[in-house]
């Protein structure tokens, strides 16, 4: 399936770019947003980041295979102090989900990796390590905390029982275990019964929430005054972090009489959602939320 960038026009128009803008794309993926920026603004430059080494860049795109929590190092390598726009598209590209071979999708039987690193080493955390080595309580905590899965304890208990018999090594085996753990009525819901557990494992393996907090702070710091940051999130955990971060930047700080002015303004107080037409053409856009903030100083 060809990857389609979500909220493409809304994101680019919301950034308020000019012909020679320098843009930092922190989650390049399929490159949809960056390539459209370069199509509209011929003299623009994009510095792109993606941890997946299978991702390739393009003309006028400087691509770095890094975690976006290290975006400050990337900009240093480019000798860039400040940028005119920052993009975070926190969704996984279709290619990563469907053809990486690393176990991101519960619809394929693949090795239980779920790491963004194309060739993880022995020291790198994988979903297989989490599933087979972490305590039952820890599993329940991350499945509930990161996946908001109501049957987290049951799933963790069945995982613990099954791994005692033999190690759990593939996504197919994990899906069958989850299926065994949840009630039959839960298996027929609109959202696949393994979705939340897989999300939780992916977040835990890649420390996605910790990286997001660090990346937002560094991304905002990298903005020029009057420039903007756009963040597209796809689940409530991410969106809460983004919303909280934006609110802190846009609110005055300190105690009277020495109250400091806010550092930013919210371009949209409520998140921008995909249109019915976009959702019809790209079902993954239904959960997307776009928030844009402008740095004042």
Image (cartoon, rainbow, N blue to C red):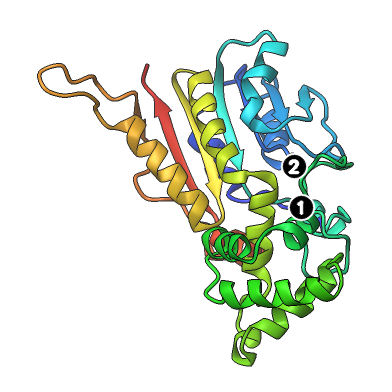
Query: Callout 2: few (<14), some (14-19), or many (20+) C-alpha neighbours within 10 Å?
Result: many
Query: Callout 1: few (<14), some (14-19), or many (20+) C-alpha neighbours within 10 Å?
Result: some
Left or right, 104 with reference to 262: right
Question: Mark number for residue 64?
Answer: none
Relative image position of residue 165 (x, y in whole percent): 84, 76
Q: Quadrant of residue 197?
A: bottom right
* Camera-nearest residue between 50 and 228: 50
Local SS, label 1: loop
* Camera-nearest residue between 245 and 47: 245
> Farthest residue toward the top?
79
Local SS, label 2: loop
Q: At 82% from the left edge and 54% from the top edge, which residue is drawn?
A: 113
Left or right, 270 with reference to 281: left
Q: The N terminus lies in which quarter of the figure?
A: bottom right
Q: At 63% from the left edge and 44% from the top edge, which residue is drawn?
A: 207
* Camera-nearest residue between 161 and 24: 161
Question: Mark number for residue 29?
Answer: 2
* Camera-nearest residue between 189 and 184: 184
Residue 17 in view, yes or no: no
Is disc 1 in contact with disc 2, using a CB cutoff of under 8 Å?
yes
Relative image position of residue 9 (x, y in whole percent): 57, 44
Q: At 35% from the left edge and 30% from the top edge, which residue is drawn?
A: 249
Q: At 74% from the left edge and 51% from the top edge, which residue is drawn?
A: 93
Question: Mark number for residue 3?
Answer: 1
Left or right, 1 with reference to 184: right
**Mark 1 vs 2, N-terminal side:** 1
Q: Nearer the viewer, mark 1 or mark 2?
A: 2
Residue 220 in view, yes or no: yes
> Farthest residue toward the left?
257
Q: The C terminus lies in which quarter of the figure?
A: top left
Relative image position of residue 78 (x, y in whole percent): 71, 12
């Amino acid at each position: 399936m060809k990857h389609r960038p979500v909220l493409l026009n809304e994101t680019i128009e919301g950034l308020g770019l000019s012909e020679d803008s320098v843009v930092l794309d922190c989650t390049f993926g399929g490159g949809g947003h960056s390539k459209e920026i370069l199509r509209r603004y011929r003299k623009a430059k994009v510095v792109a980041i993606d941890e997946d080494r299978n991702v390739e860049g393009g003309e006028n795109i400087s691509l770095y295979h890094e975690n976006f929590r290290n975006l400050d190092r990337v900009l240093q390598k480019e000798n860039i102090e400040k940028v005119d726009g920052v993009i975070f598209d926190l969704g996984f590209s279709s290619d990563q989900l469907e053809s990486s071979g690393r176990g991101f999708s519960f619809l394929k039987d693949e090795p239980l990796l779920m790491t963004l690193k194309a060739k993880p080493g022995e020291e790198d955390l994988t979903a297989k390590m989490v599933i087979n080595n972490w305590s039952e309580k820890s599993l329940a905590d991350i499945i509930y905390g990161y996946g908001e899965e109501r049957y987290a304890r049951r799933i963790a208990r069945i995982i613990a029982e099954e791994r005692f018999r033999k190690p759990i090594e593939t996504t197919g085996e994990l899906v069958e275990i989850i299926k065994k753990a949840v009630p039959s009525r839960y298996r027929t819901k609109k959202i696949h019964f393994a979705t939340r557990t897989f999300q939780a494992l992916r977040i835990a393996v890649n420390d996605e929430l910790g990286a997001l907090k660090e990346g937002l702070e560094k991304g905002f710091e990298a903005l020029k005054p009057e420039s903007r940051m756009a963040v597209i999130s796809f689940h409530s955990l991410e969106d809460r972090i983004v919303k909280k971060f934006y609110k802190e930047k846009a609110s005055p700080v300190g105690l009277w009489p020495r109250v400091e002015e806010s550092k930013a303004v919210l371009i949209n107080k409520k998140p921008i959602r995909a249109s019915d037409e976009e959702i019809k053409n790209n079902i993954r856009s239904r959960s997307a939320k776009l928030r844009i903030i402008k740095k004042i100083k």
